[in-house]
């Protein structure tokens, strides 16, 4: 299977699974359910679940075994977008080119839809039938990896640190602190979850974790650069929002040209970490290339 | 150990464990951490974690084995209070006699503190050292039980249904739908989690689940009655909030006297479900009595 076919096929696998978890004909309570589907099935790039499946397959695992965890991570990512967009947070009215959840459904329902997605991610990741053939001890470790990456010492902590830093002069260490947690932690967890489900050896897990760290950081730098350049078209968000909110970004601390250069280096580091895996890691390579390709020629 | 000593001892066990999970000297990012501790360590009654420990001990289990799950459930309960109090939700400024989280820390931090508590509940419930001696398959089942009770088809769904019903004429079936989910589900999960960790037999699990359902419902009815009577003192909330928000409550649908009567019957049903457990279930009995005792003489 060539890598584009792989991506297309696996993306469809994720879309169908997410749709099954919150089917259109399930309607109690109706508004909450529609709000969940609105954000969950709105055509995201599905980078995190693809990373989980790709990491599992890079070490010879089955994609179906990794699928519930991949979906759980995408649900957590989706909840974080809904909550980050709220008026009290980043106050964004546009996401992926569409009105944000609270603009359509109101703040209360948006908060609850986020809460539900976050909670049900853990329901799905611990559902007995889905875990058939997976060592339960390993499944617990995967769930723990995801929860740790998403909580106070991971993604939520990063978002909180980001808000605390608004309007302050920040150095590179602080920007790193924020982004390792805010974006990097869940991307890394996505890779590690796939590797763990597929029973990667400790040494393969280390290599994949390095890949995950590099692309986590690279992803954020690309986002910062695109935001600084005001590219609403590429990010689907209103451009310049970071500057408007006086956010700490790589673009503001390093400057755009150096940030672009850093993103390219991180992509190369990520590819280097995959050397031992041969052809099986081609999807992981393609994802790393695609993340940085969003920068265009600059 | 008499039952008051048991309650005091176990409550302290829970307080100390919660304090260890978010220690006072851990300060990154500082505001988030303080907001988490503000709500988590503010002297709640700890009914849910006590139920988990009491259910485990009723079937001969060790309280220490049940403790991480008990704490996870209390963290989920705490997050739900923080989010429910938000201006976009119930807009409450007082909780347990203190200013609510968002009044002290602002809306953004309150949302994030809730998100962190919810996420880290699952981190704590899957932490390897804490699970020593617990069959991992059983641990997964406990985590699944908790997540299911807390998510879209449980607590969050109940809160959403409650908000959808505001200002509408609702019947008893609708009030039941709401409260079975909004309050009952997590109370029942607290009981079931303890029973499952302690490897209760299927038949003992059934009895304890019936106890859990009865007290879940009884708890909500007592809350509704106290709110209708405007008893700020007993609930620590501003009285009459339900009527102000035109909420569907047992007090409004059944009338206060019938609702009081129903709470007493539910307590007796709960006690009847415990008959087989003998002296070991005394803490569970005391909790059922204490819930209804809040009604006073009426």
Image (cartoon, coloured by chain):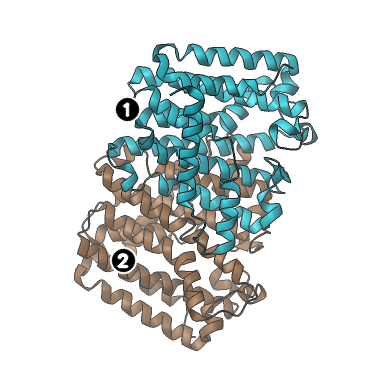
Chain colours: A cyan, B brown
Task: Look at the numbered disc 1 and give the secondary structure of its residue.
Answer: loop
Crowd band around label 2 with a 10 angstrom C-alpha radius: few (<14), some (14–19), many (20+): many
Residue A199's tag is 1
Quadrant of the rendered structure where residue A294 is?
A: top right
Above or below: residue A164 compared with residue B223: above
Reading the image, the residue beneath label 2 is B209
Please, which chain is the residue tagged with disc 2 on?
Answer: B
Drawn side of residue A4 relative to residue A127, left or right: right
Kindly identify the residue that appears in the image at 69 percent across and 33 percent down. A235
Q: Position of residue A128 (x, y in %)?
A: 31, 48
Q: Position of residue B159 (x, y in %)?
A: 55, 63
Q: Say which of A69 and B78 sits in front.
A: A69
Please, which chain is the residue tagged with disc 1 on?
Answer: A
Task: Look at the numbered disc 2 and give the secondary structure of its residue.
Answer: helix
Query: Residue B88: in sight, yes or no?
Result: yes
Q: Say which of A119 and B72 sits in front.
A: A119
Residue A286's tag is none
The residue positioned farthest toward the right in the image shown: A244
Kindly identify the residue that appears in the image at 24 percent across and 44 percent down. B135
């Amino acid at each position: 299977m060539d890598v584009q076919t792989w991506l297309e096929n696996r993306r469809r696998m994720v879309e169908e699974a997410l749709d099954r978890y919150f089917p259109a004909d399930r309607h109690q309570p109706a508004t909450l359910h529609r709000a969940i589907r609105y954000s969950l099935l709105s055509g995201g790039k599905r980078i995190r679940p693809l990373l989980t499946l790709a990491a599992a397959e890079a070490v010879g695992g089955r994609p179906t075994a990794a699928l519930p965890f991949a979906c759980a991570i995408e649900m957590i990512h989706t909840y974080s977008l809904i909550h980050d967009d709220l008026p009290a947070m980043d106050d964004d009215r546009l996401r992926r080119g569409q009105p944000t959840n609270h603009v359509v459904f109101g703040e209360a329902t948006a908060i609850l839809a986020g809460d539900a997605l976050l909670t049900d991610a853990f329901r799905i990741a611990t559902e007995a039938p889905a875990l058939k053939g997976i060592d339960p001890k390993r499944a617990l470790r995967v769930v723990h990896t995801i929860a740790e990456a998403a909580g106070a010492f991971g993604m939520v902590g990063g978002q909180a640190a980001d808000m605390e830093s608004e309007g302050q002069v920040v150095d590179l260490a602080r920007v790193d602190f924020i982004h390792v947690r805010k974006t990097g932690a869940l991307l890394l967890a996505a890779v590690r979850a796939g590797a763990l489900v597929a029973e990667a050896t400790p040494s393969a897990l280390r290599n994949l974790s390095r890949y995950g760290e590099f692309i986590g950081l690279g992803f954020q730098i690309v986002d910062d650069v695109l935001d600084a350049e005001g590219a609403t078209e590429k990010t689907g968000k209103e451009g310049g929002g970071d500057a408007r909110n006086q956010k700490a970004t790589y673009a503001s601390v390093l400057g755009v040209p150096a940030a672009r250069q850093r993103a390219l280096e991180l992509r190369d580091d990520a590819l280097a970490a995959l050397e031992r895996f041969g052809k099986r890691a081609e999807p992981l390579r393609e994802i790393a290339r695609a993340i940085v390709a969003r920068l265009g020629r600059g």
